[in-house]
Image (cartoon, helix red, strand yellow):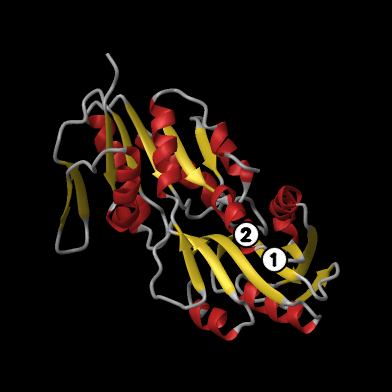
């Protein structure tokens, strides 16, 4: 007998989970989160999940309560005899801690993987990991989706005459190169140096930007400092226009101010993380239809390769 699909949402991803469930062709399951006066909380499923394929939608952006709520929900589903417990994590938090980049630091991404495995997750569905090797931190299948299936058609629709793809740093060169190949465009790379997170010491650009319409490509935008500095630098060097596409809109600190004051014409993001405020320069593309399609394919043991563009 085919197992039934049930989709649930964490507290902070309800806005997206509702759209994913609708795209799949179903509704969100009933659940509640009991809260104690000291801040402790306890999620509970308010309907049976016995023998079901349970999909739990939760992006793990700060605060850490979002991650812990997901862990509790996974544990609850496992103890309620769910057949499969799939964590749908549009944004995988702590992914920037994917290696020891200096002595005596944690590898946060690996720790999160261990916690999810210990809780009882049987599969992960996520999008644009900060580092591809994070998939190897898990001993369960990881379906790694790419926002390029949304961004590339949008970039093509702009019909920019002298399109050039730009990587905001050396680490993003692989992603930028894939975009450039698909769009048959030129590519430039920004080289930056920083002594600590979120603060850039120096930046330069490798390649010609004069008279070109630049599209910066990155997996996430945090304070917006790198994008703003890169855009202004390229405009100073003769670029005709600068746009940016970034999957995860972390947008912390003075990010909105940095974006508004910069020469960036438009910042295109997805809804893996909700915006804390609106901006005339920020356009949001929804990942709901893509995740809804993949949920169906995963449940039916079908290939998800058709969702990849590059």
- Residue at numbered disc 2: 155
The span from disc 2 to disc 1 (Cα, nearest Å) is 8 Å
Which quadrant of the figure contains the C terminus? Answer: top right
Label 2 secondary element? helix
Residue most toward the top?
1
Q: Earlier in the sequence, mark 2 or mark 1?
A: 2
Residue 265 at x, y percent in the picture: 60, 76
Mark 2, Cα crowd under 10 Å, few <14 / some 14-19 / many 20+, is some
- Residue at numbered disc 1: 160
54 vs 78, nearest the viewer: 54
Q: Is residue 46 above or below residue 153?
A: above
Residue 10 at x, y percent in the picture: 29, 50
Residue for point 80% across, 80% down: 238
160 vs 206, nearest the viewer: 160
Q: Is residue 11 above or below residue 116?
A: below
Q: Disc 2 vs disc 1: Cβ atoms closer than 8 Å?
A: yes
Left or right, 194 with respect to 298, comes to: right
Residue for point 70% across, 57% down: 172
Mark 1, Cα crowd under 10 Å, few <14 / some 14-19 / many 20+, is some
Q: Nearer the viewer, mark 2 or mark 1?
A: 1
In the rendered image, which quarter is residue 82 located in?
top left
Q: Is residue 171 visible?
A: yes
172 vs 209, nearest the viewer: 209
Left or right, 277 with respect to 50, comes to: right
Left or right, 229 with respect to 147, comes to: right
In the rendered image, which quarter is residue 216 located in?
bottom right
């Amino acid at each position: 007998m085919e197992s039934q699909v049930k989709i649930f949402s964490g507290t902070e991803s309800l806005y997206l989970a509702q759209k994913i469930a609708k795209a799949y062709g179903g509704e969100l399951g009933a659940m509640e989160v009991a809260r104690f006066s000291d801040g402790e909380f306890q999620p509970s499923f308010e309907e049976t999940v016995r023998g079901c394929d349970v999909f739990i939608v939760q992006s793990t952006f700060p605060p850490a309560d979002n991650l812990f709520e997901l862990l509790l929900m996974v544990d609850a589903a496992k103890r309620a005899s769910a057949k499969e417990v799939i964590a749908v994590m549009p944004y995988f938090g702590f992914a920037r801690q994917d290696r020891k980049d200096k002595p005596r630091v944690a590898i946060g991404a690996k720790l999160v993987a261990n916690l999810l495995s210990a809780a009882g997750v049987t599969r992960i569905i996520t999008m644009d990991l900060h580092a591809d090797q994070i998939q190897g931190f898990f001993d369960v299948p990881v379906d790694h989706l790419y926002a390029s299936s949304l961004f590339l058609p949008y970039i093509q629709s702009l019909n920019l005459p002298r399109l050039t793809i730009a990587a905001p740093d050396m680490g993003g060169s692989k992603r930028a190169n894939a975009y450039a190949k698909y769009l048959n465009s030129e590519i430039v790379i920004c080289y930056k140096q920083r002594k600590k997170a979120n603060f850039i010491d120096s930046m330069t650009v490798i390649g010609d930007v004069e008279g070109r319409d630049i599209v910066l490509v990155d997996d996430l935008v945090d304070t917006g400092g790198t994008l703003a500095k890169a855009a202004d630098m390229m405009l100073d060097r003769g670029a005709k226009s600068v746009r940016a596409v970034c999957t995860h809109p972390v947008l912390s600190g003075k990010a909105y101010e940095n974006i508004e004051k910069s020469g960036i014409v438009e910042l295109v993001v997805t809804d893996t993380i909700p915006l804390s405020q609106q901006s005339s320069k920020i356009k949001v593309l929804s990942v709901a239809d893509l995740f809804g399609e993949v949920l169906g394919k995963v449940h039916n043991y079908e290939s998800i390769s058709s969702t990849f563009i590059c």
